[in-house]
Image: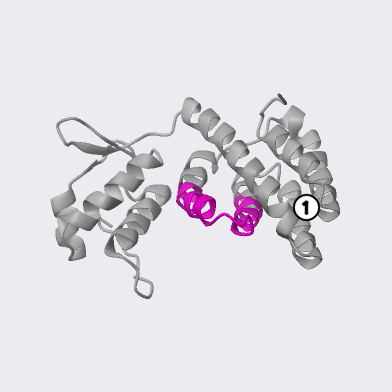
Amino acid sequence: MSPERFEAPRGPAEPLSETVFRALAQAIVRGDIPPQRRLNDERIARQYGVSRTPVREAFRRLESIGFIEIYANRRTAVTSVTARTVRESLTYAGYQAGFAVHAGLPLLSPDERAEAAQLARDAGRYVRSPAEASTARRRLFSYLSEHSGNPMHHTHMRDLEYAFERNLGGYLVPPELAAAAEADFEALAGAILRGDRAQAEEIVRRLHGIDPD
């Protein structure tokens, strides 16, 4: 696949900018478009059969999640994932996940709490395996965000899922903290089942390395 070729079928009545954004984001996550690769809006528009307007709109969204940098001379390039990127992404993910728990937990039915608790246990099971752990965490917090009663937050989190997948997909809990993280996910499952959002939010932030206030 050439660096700027991408495929993403459009959903029903999906705006072109959404299609282009998803396609580029997925290509960057997969590594089909590597770090430091320059992106040309005219070339992408031509390859995808759209005008430059939806491509530029997609670029703005990609910039907002840290996937690309748009320079003053209009040069656009894919960013790299650094140790700082991982730290910042982990902290931001913790605050956003904490909000999802705080807002969503009171709205869950007993069956939905049971489902969310199982997702928390799944995340705990994969603590020692980076790829599986990243996927399990995203499933849990995406579920809670979806049920947060706040469409704006959920829409924001959907975009950020690409960033978290790319930036945290290789993150591994330090071995000396793995057992504590497994216990925390089990405790999170219990807090979810009880509907204890204060404890659940505290655990979520601790799992992301955020010290209590």
Give me the residue at 70% from left, 41% from top: 128
List x then y, in percent, for residue 149.
61, 57
List x then y, in percent, for residue 50.
18, 63
Kindly tell me whether residue 197 is visible in this rendering: yes
Callout 1 crowding tier (Cα within 10 Å): few <14, some 14–19, many ≥20: many
Q: Is residue 5 magenta?
A: no
Kindly tell me whether residue 3 is visible in this rendering: no
From which residue to which does the magenta span run? Answer: 138-162
List x then y, in percent, for residue 65.
41, 41
Toward the viewer: 108 or 79? Answer: 108
Toward the viewer: 37 or 145? Answer: 145
Q: How many marks?
A: 1
Q: Secondary structure at mark 1?
A: helix
Is the residue 150 above or below the residue 200 in the image?
Answer: below
List x then y, in percent, for residue 206.
72, 32
Write down the quadrant of residue 171 in the picture.
top right
Q: Which quarter of the rendering shows the N terminus? A: bottom left
Is the residue 202 above or below the residue 196 in the image?
Answer: above
Give me the residue at 50% from left, 27% from top: 83
What residue is disc 1 on?
Answer: 121
Q: Is residue 196 left or right of residue 159?
A: right
| Magenta-drawn stretch, dominant element (helix, strand or loop) | helix
Give me the residue at 35% from left, 69% from top: 14
Q: Which quarter of the rendering shows the C terminus? A: top right
